[in-house]
Amino acid sequence: MDPKPRFPFRRTRGLAAAGAPPYVLAIFDAGPAVADRYTIIFGRDLAVPPDSTHPYWSIRYLASSSDPASPHGMSQWGEFREQVARGYMRCTTDERIGWRDLPENVRTHVIFRAKE
């Protein structure tokens, strides 16, 4: 039997075919006008399951600029409650993009941060 409750999300189609790591659930691009241009949402492997103190999944995401390793760039972890993550993924005006749409330096950074 699975030790964690059923995860409430499915991975965005095409991410596996594009070579995205299995822990990447979805990727969004808010455009060049904002510092946290990219939002990378992670799946079950990096999520916090419900327990007796909080009854919902906490879905982790990484907000990143287009040059996260630069002194002027940004890369910051965050968490959505399950319901907020669902709303964001359904209603955001940010563009849903694929793994290969991320600049190579951002892809490398995402992998590095996910393994920290």
Image: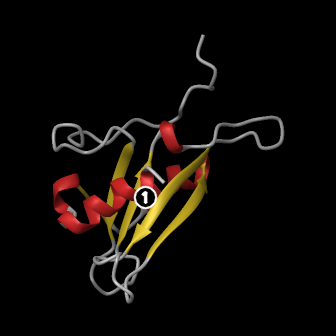
Find numbered disc 1 in the image and state the secondary structure of the residue it sits on. Answer: helix
In the picture as drawn, the residue positioned furthest to the right comes out as: 53
Compared to 81, does 14 lie above or below?
above
**At 48% across and 54% down in the image, what residue appears?**
116
Compared to 26, does 43 lie above or below?
above
Image-quadrant location for residue 64 = bottom left
Compared to 15, does 78 lie above or below?
below
Compared to 12, does 72 lie above or below?
below
**At 64% across and 20% down in the image, what residue appears?**
3
Is residue 90 visible in this depiction of the protein? no
Image-quadrant location for residue 103 = bottom left
**At 35% across and 75% down in the image, what residue appears?**
68
Is residue 37 visible in this depiction of the protein? yes
The mark tally for this picture is 1
Image-quadrant location for residue 17 = top left
Q: Amino acid at mark 1?
A: Arg
Quadrant in which the N terminus appears:
top right
Compared across the picture, whether 47 is left or right of 106 comes to right
**At 77% across and 44% down in the image, what residue appears?**
54
Q: Which residue is mark 1?
A: 113
In the picture as drawn, the residue positioned furthest to the top comes out as: 1
